[in-house]
Each structure stands twice: as C-alpha cells, then as structure tokens.
Image (cartoon, rainbow, N blue to C red):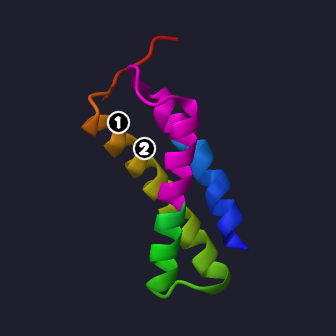
C-alpha cells in the first residue's frame, strides 16, 4: 500500500531535485524515474529495518524522500551537473 505513496512522493522529489540542477542531464523523465527508484529503495530499506505500522509509515515516507533526493542529485553530480541558485 505504501509503495504507491513512495513512488508518487519520490517522483515529486526527483522532479524538484532535477529542477535545482542545471545542465543538459537526463531530463525530466529520468529525474522522475530516479526519484521514484530512490524513494522505493529508501522505503524498503526502512521496512526491512523494522519500521512497520502507522508510525512506520511516517518514518519510511520521510526516508523515501531523502532517498529520492539523494539518488537524483548523486547521479547528477556523477555526470557533471551542479546545483546553482536560481534567480526569481
């Protein structure tokens, strides 16, 4: 049940992390997919660590957000994209 939530949250976080990066990277679709993959990995990691039930849902979703951002930004750094401040 939480898998769908992790995928959705991860896609949103991956998109946001991709927007914070400049360069010709992989594009929006790959940022969404990497965010979802990072979220699922982080969520399953916390579930296997023993966080279950109602309280575990909050913890696993939080770790899924961190996993999505980390995977998206780590892949971007490896390929030469950098984080820049954007002017509004």
- Per the image, is 40 magenta? no
Question: Residue 3's image quarter?
Answer: bottom right
Residue 63: x and y, percent? 48, 64
Q: Residue at x 70, y 63 (%)?
A: 4
Residue 34: x and y, percent? 49, 47
**For this view, does 58 lie left or right of residue 71?**
right
Q: CA distance from mark 1 to mark 2?
A: 6 Å
Q: Quadrant of the N terminus?
A: bottom right
- 10 Å neighbourhood of mark 2: few (<14), some, or many (≥20)? many
Magenta residues (range): 15-39
The tally of labels here is 2
Q: Are marks 1 and 2 in contact (CB under 8 Å)?
A: yes
Q: Secondary structure under badge 2?
A: helix
Residue 69: x and y, percent? 44, 47
Question: Residue 75's image quarter?
Answer: top left
Query: To which residue does mark 1 refer?
Result: 76
Task: Please tell me whether residue 8 is drawn above or below residue 47 in the rendered image.
Answer: above
Q: Main secondary structure of the magenta part?
A: helix
Task: Please tell me whether residue 86 is drawn above or below residue 4 in the rendered image.
Answer: above
Task: Please tell me whether residue 80 is drawn above or below residue 13 in the rendered image.
Answer: above
Query: To which residue does mark 2 refer?
Result: 72
């Amino acid at each position: 049940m939480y898998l769908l939530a992790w995928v959705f949250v991860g896609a949103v976080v991956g998109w946001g992390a991709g927007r914070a990066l400049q360069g010709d990277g992989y594009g929006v679709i790959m940022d969404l997919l990497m965010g979802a993959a990072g979220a699922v990995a982080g969520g399953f990691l916390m579930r296997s660590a023993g966080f279950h039930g109602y309280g575990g849902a909050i913890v696993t979703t939080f770790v899924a957000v961190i996993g999505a951002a980390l995977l998206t930004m780590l892949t971007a750094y490896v390929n030469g994209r950098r984080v820049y401040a954007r002017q509004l």
